[in-house]
Amino acid sequence: MQKQIFGAFLQNEKNPLSRISQANSCISLDPFTGCSLGCVYCYRHNSKRDNNSFIPKRLFSDEEIIKALINHPYFIPNKTIIGIGVASTDAFLPKVENSSFNIMNILSKKGYKNPFWFVIKSGIPKKSSKKFKNIINRGNHIIFSISYSGMPKIVEPFSGNRFNNIDEAIEAGASVSLHLRPLVLGWNDDYKNLERVIKKGIANGCTSVCYGGLRFLDGIEKAITQRYGLAFPKINKNELMKTMPIEIEQNIKNIFKKHDYHIPLFSHSSEVISHYLGIKDYNMNALRGRDYFLKINEKDANTLGLNNDSIKILIQQAIDELKINSKVFKKGDKYFLSKRINYIEERALIHRLSFYNFL
């Protein structure tokens, strides 16, 4: 278990950077701790600061969080995907919703056109269409991933309507995807359950579906087995990779084929966000590998007028901008880093390169 939320920029709890974290597909702003939804697998169980918080409690003002964000070298104006409450709570719980709107409004009124991404379960507040529309009209795309995967109540106690008032967000111009996550053998892998959930998500306006498994963290294992007294599911003990059972993946594809669904089906959140923004996958999943940093086809590079030297220069430029202690070198069509970098640095570097319109 960690002291702060996974990927936090700083461990000092008196600093607002302790509530700003590098998630896989966004930078998450978490001015609150505490969530009343009670999901047994929640990532907040891996944070000592968040583990025992069940009622939202403010830790920093919105202004403090925003100031810390825009002054941080990992933030890219108009480009960085900004999540709100992704790491700690539901952004539209009654005690949190005003803050979520306030953060978006402050940034958009300052002229930042960064996209906002929400992963939510509690629905959208009533009469919120105009609020969303004002933000979208200033140039900020808003994307909702509705987390709904048909979990049993013993795993997900919340029984409210996940799609409550979602039509108001759609009317305002927001994009909505079904976040079919996490999918876990023995919990929600039944074919009929998957079919029911997918049909409901599409019927309620979701224009894409993103599936995925559960990622192992020590705090989650302890919460599931010790706090909630449940058997821990069979997932790989890897803190950076989710376990996605291939049989569930195939069932989802069969359901799409059976019902002749033609909306996009994704396995990465970054693909969902990229789809709605009209860009290539900014996590560059197709280019990354376990034993190298990036693998870039020479033909693709030449198409964009790049060569070996210019690619190396771009990568090193990004490394230096982020003040990462490493150098880039090349072997064949693969690029390597001279020193191993941590998760936060790696994500920041990938996003910086991607938003260079790298490839």
Image: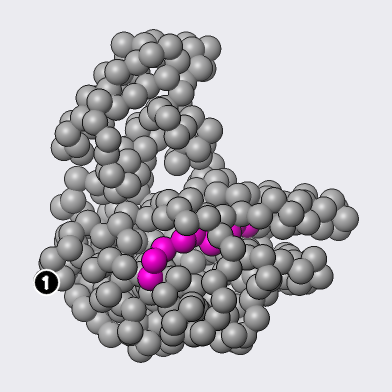
Q: Is residue 149 magenta?
A: no
Residue 117 image offset from top left, x and y in percent: 45, 60
Type of the residue with mark 1 = Lys
Q: Residue at x 29, y 27 (%)?
A: 337
Instruction: Give the side of residue 63 with respect to residue 255, left or right.
Output: left
Residue 152 image offset from top left, x and y in percent: 65, 81
How would you rate the neighbour count of disc 1 (Cα within 10 Å): few for under 14, some for 14-19, many for 20 or more?
few
Instruction: Give the side of residue 171 with respect to residue 354, left or right.
Output: right
Secondary structure beneath dot 1 equals loop
Q: Nearer the viewer, residue 280 or 106?
A: 280
Q: Residue at x 40, y 28 (%)?
A: 292
Which residues are the magenta region? 210-219
**Rendered image quadrant of residue 186:** bottom right
Q: Nearer the viewer, residue 338 or 200?
A: 338
Is residue 72 visible to us here? yes
Image quarter hosting the N terminus: bottom left
Residue 49 image offset from top left, x and y in percent: 26, 76
Q: Which residue is mark 1?
A: 14
